[in-house]
Image: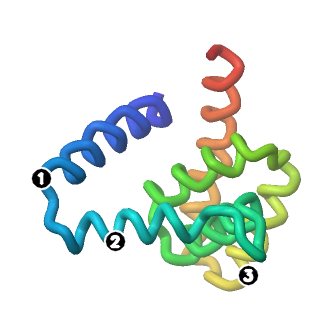
Amino acid sequence: MRYKEFKDYRQRMNEKIMEEGSLQTKRFFFLDTSVYKEGKISAKTKELMGLVASMVLRCNDCILYHLDRCIELGYTNEELYEAMDVALIVGGSITIPHLRYAYEMIEEIRKEKISE
């Protein structure tokens, strides 16, 4: 249930940050949200780019967030696996533990979404 725990934690802490954080922090959060909106590049493609970047940077929280968004936006497992192959080539073998994590989380996200 790491997926559900992550979503609950992320929401709770983001609310706290928005209440108590500095103006600079709030601006950064706004920019982060804004950059993934529809533009010349679709929001769907931007989320996939975010997933690849997160894998290369080896941030499991970021990987989970972008996997969730990618699945919500309609990516198939096969499309996600192909994108993660790009991350593996760019990031090298050090990304393999994060690849394992991503495969596990795809399965967990899909199971959770079925039960909703």
Residue 22 in percent (x, y) is at 14, 66
Q: Position of residue 78 (x, y in %)?
A: 87, 52
Residue type at tag 1: Glu
- Specify few, some or many for label 1: CA neighbours under 10 Å numbering under 14, 14-19, or 20 or more: few
* Disc 1: which residue: 20
* SS for callout 2: helix
Residue under the image location 84 percent in, 64 percent down: 82
The residue lying at 35 percent from left, 39 percent from top is: 11
- The image shows residue 49 at horizontal and vertical percentages of 68, 71
Q: Nearer the viewer, mark 3 or mark 2?
A: 2
Category of crowding for the residue at label 3, using alpha-carbon neighbours closer than 10 angstroms: few (below 14), some (14–19), many (at least 20): few
Q: CA distance from mark 3 to mark 1?
A: 40 Å
Residue lying at 60% horizontally and 65% vertically, measured from the top left = 36
Residue shown at the point (45%, 67%) measured from the top left: 32
Residue 28's tag is 2
24 to 7, vertically: above or below: below
Answer left or right for 71 relative to 27.
right
Find disc 3 in the rendering and name its residue.
Answer: 89
At label 2, which amino acid type do we have? Phe
10 up-or-down from 66: above or below: above
Of the numbered discs 3 and 2, the one sitting upstream in the chain is: 2
Mark 3 → mark 2, Cα distance in angstroms: 30 Å
What is the three-letter code of the residue carrying label 3? Ile
SS class, disc 3:
helix
Q: Residues within 10 Å of mark 2 (few under 14, many from 20)?
A: few
Q: Quadrant of the C terminus?
A: top right
Q: Nearer the viewer, residue 26 or 61?
A: 26
**SS for dot 1:** helix
